[in-house]
Amino acid sequence: MKEKTKFVCGECGYETVKWLGCCPGCGGWNTLVEVAAVAPSKSGGSKTLGGGSRAVSLASVMETDSIRISTGIAEFDRVLGGGVVAGSTVLVGGDPGIGKSTLLIQAASNLIKHGPVLYVSGEESKAQLKLRASRCGVDESLLIMTETSIDAIESEVERVKPGFLVIDSIQTMISPELNNATGSVTQIREATTSLTRIAKSNGCAVFIVGHVTKEGAIAGPRMLEHMVDTVLYFEGDRHDSLRLLRAVKNRFGSTNEIGIFEMRSEGLCEVENTAGLFVTGGNDTGCAVTCIMEGNRPILVEVQSLLNSTSFANPRRVAAGMDTNRLMLLIAVLERRGGLRINDKDVYTNAVGGIRIDDRGADLAIAMAVAGSVFDRPLPESTVVIGELSLTGEIRTVDRLYNRVQECARLGYKHAVVPASAKLKGIDGIDLIKVRYLRDAFLTFTDK
């Protein structure tokens, strides 16, 4: 008898009995993968997540969301929203070698004081785990297990009753009941479902390591991110020691926070003071310093720009650490509202330190960096530029401007170019230069 198969979309999980070039669910092309169709269980339903299936009143539910457990790593706690919530599932993704396993084994060592911790690896042997744990100074009472079978892991969880479970990685986990290959859409979905059930039924916080694709998304079905409570991404260059941990989904906290770490020989170390990390400290042409907000943390970032004559009909627009489409929009404003001629120049911009700028408050700094390259003039020393640039050339105010300027003053900056529409009073130690339009901001450039 021929085995029944179906086609599942790797992006949204849409299922169909025949192959389609375009997924009707998400519109993605060539995302449908053939998998074996799993017969429904005789009981007619799946395992419960715990607590039975009877309805209860909202008043009878205990409020436990506010109970958070510290991982012992302040930057990790910041991104999680204050700590780990019991019964939650946290997915940590990132490039190979970025530090995912190192961070989680260090956090697991600190969590032992709050209850048993089980670290399950499907990629490393026990001897390899021992070497990495010794290098990071991990508590030797940490329970380790090398296994890829979800059923075996679930049995061990029932025996050990851990308060915390680490799975490294989800792409290596398999369900013996399925005939699909390891890392397939069906296997990843089934493994994540089982781990979520373990977390909810046992009150065990589960950390899951996920690999990423060439595009930077976590490998496997896109619905994997919808099944977990928190999704964290590790960013940074493997050849650089700086690492950024960013939350893209968090049911228990903000998604605007980032954690900053430095990779050293003894493992990942927290970086509490960000002063100087993303600023070179010079006063060169084509450079502008701005202050962005990552959650409640103001961070100073230097934007660099380089213009070069092009011999092609379509000049290049290259942006490192920022959105290329946003850069093209700002260049159009510079040409139309600022009167600059850039259509015959290649434009290259870069955010120092490998940080990614998504804050609109950096618009004016990016525009001033490009304009500085056109004028071949630097900004005055100890000057920061903060503001959003509209299509009309007007400088708009940004959120928490007072906190940004106050941080700049604390770090020794003397001048701040800010929107004139901002209701901002004087701040000790820093001179406010209020500008209303883009052309007004150009007047702050100094002669060489």
Image (cartoon, rainbow, N blue to C red):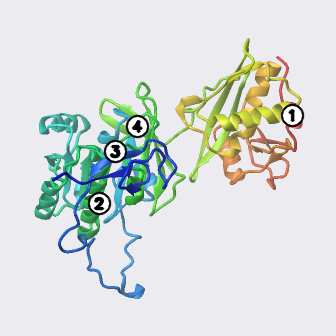
Q: Secondary structure at mark 1?
A: helix
Label 4 sits on residue: 213
Label 2 sits on residue: 193
Residue 255 seen in the figure: yes
Contact between labelled residues 1 and 4, with CB atoms less than 8 Å apart = no
Residue at 29% x, 41% y is 101
Q: Report, in whole angstroms, how far the alpha carbon at label 4 lies from the one at label 1.
A: 39 Å
Q: Report, in whole angstroms, how far the alpha carbon at label 3 lies from the one at label 1.
A: 45 Å
Where is residue 184 drawn, in percent x and y? Answer: 29, 45
Contact between labelled residues 1 and 3, with CB atoms less than 8 Å apart = no
Residue density around tag 1, few if under 14, some if 14–19, many if 20 or more, within 10 Å: some
Residue at 25% x, 49% y is 167
429 sits left or right of 27 in the view? right
Residue at 72% x, 31% y is 382
What residue type is disc 2 on? Answer: Thr
Nearer-the-camera pick, 93 or 257? 93
